[in-house]
Amino acid sequence: MNFMPRLYKDGDFVSLVALWRIAREKATPDFQRRNGYFFYEHIWYFQEHLPPENTVWVVDGDDGRPVAFMVLKDDFMDHLYAHPDHWRKGIGEGLIRFARSTCGSTPSKRASTSARSMRKRLCRYQTGHLPAA
């Protein structure tokens, strides 16, 4: 696969929402079942928040369909998802390198902090140490 991120276009909408949902369900299936949203809610959130307020970069597979995407707002990487069939192929690392080259070193530092925080929250959730509601 030729790694060449490109900007989001309107025709990507359905593919990216589906990719987003599939990646989230595969990565955290129990969490998504208990706390996830219906597909129509993902559609609404993506449509209202991601492309209009952010810069969305897409990576296409050999067949031309999106296999990963990243969402940047200024110097902050808010989302980075790859289809599970394309995990462990360096696409996520490539998008982080691309973000560094586009925005400087800040996105990876802030994204790493966010990822560590997410792993801690997920670990607490999986072990039953949930925050008080």
Image: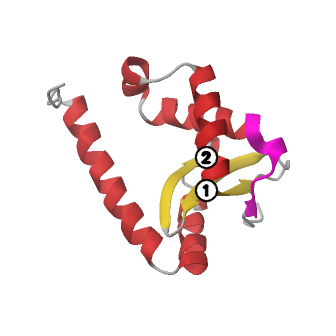
Q: Position of residue 126 (x, y in %)?
A: 24, 30
Question: Is 115 left or right of 24, judged from the image as shown?
Answer: left
**Is residue 118 in view?**
yes
Q: Dividing the picture into quarters, in which one does residue 3 lie?
A: bottom right
Which of the numbered marks, if any, corresponds to residue 54? 1
In this rendering, the answer to whether 131 lies above or below 98 is: above
How far apart are the two marked residues, 1 and 2, measured between alpha carbons? 6 Å
Residue 19 appears anywhere in the view: no
Q: Amino acid at mark 2?
A: Leu
Asked if the stretch drawn in magenta spans residue 8, the answer is yes
Q: Which residues are magenta?
A: 6-14
Quadrant into which the N terminus falls:
bottom right
Residue 105: % across, % down: 46, 79
Q: Nearer the viewer, residue 27 or 50?
A: 50
Please say if 13 is above or below 87: above
- Name the residue: 71% across, 57% down: 59
Mark 2, Cα crowd under 10 Å, few <14 / some 14-19 / many 20+, is: some
- Residue drawn at 56 percent across, 61 percent down: 72
In the picture provided, is 41 more to the left or to the right than 109?
right
Classify 10 Å Cα crowding around label 1: few (below 14), some (14-19), many (20 and above).
Answer: some
The kind of secondary structure element at disc 2 is helix
Pointer 2 residue: 50
Q: Is residue 133 left or right of residue 113?
A: left
- Is 131 or 116 nearer to us in this picture? 131
Cβ atoms under marks 1 and 2 closer than 8 Å: yes
Estimate the x, y position of residue 88 in percent, counting from the top left.
54, 54
Residue type at the position of mark 1: Asn
As drawn, the label of residue 9 is: none
